[in-house]
Amino acid sequence: MEWDGTYERVDWENMWTQAARGDGRVRERGGEDPGPEDQKTKNTDVAGRPSINAIQTPDGRDKCKTTDGVDKLDKKREILESIQRASRRHVEIMGTAGNGETLHASLSLSCDRPSVLSTASSCLSPSALLSTSSLSSSTSSPRLSLTPPLPPSVEMDAVLVGRRLVLDVYRGGGAVMPVLWDSVPDRMRQLQHLQLGSEDEEALHGGLGILPCLTQLRSLTIRGHRFYDAQGDPLPGLLTSLPSSISSLSLLIHLDLSFNCLSSVPPCLLSLPHLSELLLGHNQLRQLPGELGGLVALRRLSVLGNELEALPPGLGLLLGLQELDVSFNQLERLPEEMGLLHHLHTLELSSNKLRELPETLGSLHSLKVLAIHSNELRNVPECVKSLPQLTRLDVRNNPLGRPPTPLALPCAPAAQDETPIPELHLAFNQHSFSVSPAGCNVYLPGGAELLFPRGCVEGVIHFNWAERKPDKKWVWLEEHDFLLSRPLELLPHGAIFDKPVEVCVPYHRTRKGEVVVRKCDGQSWSTLDTITRRGSERHCCKPRGRPAWLACCTVSQFSWFVVVSRPVSDSCLVSPVGALLVSRYDPGIKVNFPPDCTTYTRTVTLQVLQVSLSEMRDLTGDPQASASPLLCLSQTPNMHFLQPIKVQVPLPAGLTGHNLEMSRLYLLHGDPVAHTWTDVTAQTSLSVTQLYAIFSVTHFSWYWLWYTTQSCISGVVRKVYHRLKQFRVQFLVLQRKSDLTQVLLQCLPSDKVDSRLTSLSEQYDGPQPSDVCNILEGEQFFAGFERGIDVSADRPDCMEGRLAFTFYSHLKNIKEVHVCPALQQEGPVRGQVSFYRGEVPSDLPEEVALRRKGHDSQWMATLPLRLPVRFTQSVHTCWLTYQGAGSEGSLYADRQSPPLDLGDPESGYLTQTNLLAISLRISQDWRCIGINLGLSYQELDRIQYKHRDNLGSLVLEMLFHWARTQQKAGPGAVPRLIDALVQSGRRDLAEEVEDIVSLGKRKYTESLKRVGLEMEHPTTSTQSQPT
């Protein structure tokens, strides 16, 4: 029977195209398998040719006939039977080897069929051979097992379409070549176009063994990055060399070996006389051979993304070269011989290390495109700029016009440079230090580091440091920013150093956004260039010895410093020549500024914020909803562009250009002032590709690409955007087991509550956490003690039974206070703690304040708090113990001791009420504090024995015994108490004492002003107050 190759080629090529694209008739019918009736008429008319109908003969075989009576079934059956015979031979070889090992037999084959059998058996994996063995056992539908598999309606020989064989769409597809060579050698010899993947080493070797026999090849592609691993990263190609027999492919015109592991150009390629296109991009080439100039037919050469440091002079012999791409290499200079490439019209030299261009480039009169951006060029020769046909010259990201940087003179080694820079480790009670011209590495408590280089100061300079509490005046946060550290103040402000000083602030690590250090000079905030690293191993503030994470920046003067997390930000300068801004968060996010879009240079900033897909679907109630990353575009100055700016963003998760419906795709514009989102899909030229969406804008703001089935989208987006800025938190109210009057209040993100309760369960007890509430970063709220409970504390953040907070998601948000009954009563007090939004109200009506501490509209949660009978009177009992003057241990006596006030005008006062409140919070730490206060072990043992049954009286006598000794010890008693508390690990008490003293001094000064009395010599605080 005569073989009608033309008819058969058209039909099978059509089926192969459908199989490769995945949009065949089976998918068009909703993904269902074709039934018997569909299989009988699966071949329809193609381009007006006669259709093929599959009928069944009495012996059970399929017979194909055309409407004009030409039968093609016999020829197809011959092909399938030859594939079966080749598969049986492979199975027999595998059987003789045993256990999957390969039997290398010496087979004498004809010269036109080399040792294909041994090559195939050695290259095919056992799983591939076993899959081919199914050909002999299955007579109904014989086919090779490929990954991904062929559709049911496509037979095996559809892989070989005419003179084209495409195997790079199948993982390990090269293993099919030996089988095809054994089954249809005549058709394989006529092959002209071949595409192979190089991710599978065994399959690659199998394909390379057949290549020398394909002498009619015109185009050959062997490349990686065709498949992806589980993490979504492309798999690299494993090709490291080519066999020398490839030189027999004398008709080869196109060769693509991109995305492989070639470290040198295979020598066999240098003898291909008709090679016109050679693509060697994204390999590991370090140099090009000088013999490359022998490829006289070469028209296009691409070696981008390699490690080339120089180009050979022989490159100038490629007189017919029209396109040369050597971008993204390490080139520092170009050979003068490049001026001989008179037919070159495209030259890509971007992203190298070129410092100058040779003057010979001025002879490239055919050059139309010259890309030299991202180099180190300081000027472009005039002869290059004036090339007659040059239409595009890209010179972005070059230091054009800048003077050359002078070489640093070698400095003579000084004796002082050989000595290491001294180190200074400060304790918690050391808030000042000195630095000399020799430099110093200062390590602050908590993990902060200050690195002073040699010569940064001229003489010995004294510095102070303080760690402030997070407050609105100390912290500046933009939208979607999170505070990661407490404010660090370094004094004196404004003093300029001769050399930059490195300031490293410890922070709580986060996986969202990027970490930056912000600095406040007293009036404005600025963001500093920041790098993150682990702290010094010799200066670890954690018990297990692991250094803290530090955010480091260099400054020329001291001020306030905080660490924040913000969305990933990228900036660039846009000049009239245009620019391209690519996000570091996702390289698929690009902003393209065309030439002449502006008349002056401006700074453009791109911020990217990732959105949780699961949370977004929960909020919208749409299981198919999806969104791209949130973009914020800003510029300085803020003026419209002269031309539209193209923005490219990835399509929402789970979508491609083939499976989305454009009617469900929305582009929304956000107004940060009005807090609204507007659908601008119809006003912008929104288009999509396979992976990206592209739209044009003329002004900058927030942009968000959504895919949803809902029609009214603006309100939904506004709700989701608002929730992105909020945290789901819960409130804790716990009482210390050893002292139920000591109450801990904390606000935490809901995912951290369980672990926090576990760590506090040994020392604290209390009600279950509150319900989940939503709160913003930096939002103020307060806790009010209600229904008979009051706060027994004199501190700035406490007013009339209300305790003020500011929420920061990555900080502790914790406070401890001592509570007492608001009124004298004999029974237990069953009160509550309520949490309200906003600042402490000043306009609350008196009748409402008796019951509630805040407005009902601001209420968030309420938790119960109970004081038993024995604790409602413990405060009075303990104090009366020290007021008795009669018999030993009398609790109720008429005569009282004079009031005990601790301190002096220089360091501040603590009243006996303050000491009483502090004593009731010391609890089990009393002995450690007493030792640090200077009390002897004998005195502490005596106090413990005297009050062995009453912990409150024990602590109170220890503290008051020390206070009485300080009345005659001179000034400085309060600082000594603060230092003892810090050394004992009670920084919470130390900060409370500092607040009490500061508040008392301010009240005292204000009272003097009210009565008209002024101090003759007003004292100044030892710590600088903020501007």
Image (cartoon, rainbow, N blue to C red):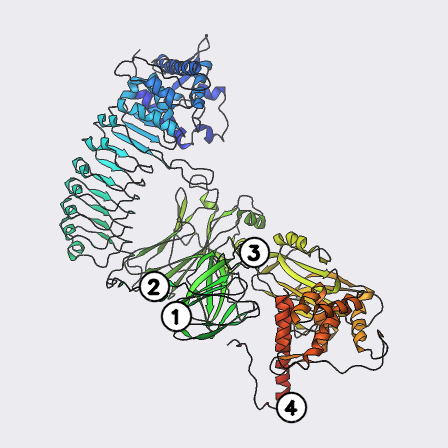
Q: Quadrant of the N terminus?
A: top left
Q: Quadrant of residue 904?
A: bottom right
On the image, numbered disc 1 is attached to which residue? 456
Residue 723 shows which numbered tag?
Answer: 3
Considering only order in the chain, which callout, 3 or 2, is on the residue closer to the N terminus?
A: 2
Query: What is the x, y in percent for residue 806?
Result: 59, 66
Mark 4 sits on what residue?
1011
Q: Specify the amino acid type for callout 2.
A: Arg
Question: Residue 577: x, y in percent?
Answer: 27, 58
Q: Earlier in the sequence, mark 1 or mark 4?
A: 1
Task: Say whether disc 1 or disc 2 marks the residue closer to the N-terminus.
Answer: 1
Instruction: Give left or right: position of 896 versus 810.
Output: right
303 versus 415 height, above or below: above
The relative height of residue 729 versus residue 875 in the rendered view (above or below) is above
Q: Nearer the viewer, residue 373 or 923?
A: 923
**Number of on-image labels:** 4
**Residue sitting at 47 percent across and 22 percent down?**
38
First in residue order: circle 3 vs circle 4: 3
**Front label number (1 vs 2):** 1
Whether 552 is drawn above or below 44: the answer is below
Q: Quadrant of residue 775?
A: bottom right
The reply to whether residue 388 is in sight is no
Disc 4 marks a residue whose amino acid type is Val
Above or below, 498 relative to 645: below
How would you rate the neighbour count of disc 3 (Cα within 10 Å): few for under 14, some for 14-19, many for 20 or more? some
Check whether the beta carbons of the residues at disc 1 and disc 2 lie within 8 A of each other: no
Mark 1 or 3: in front is: 1
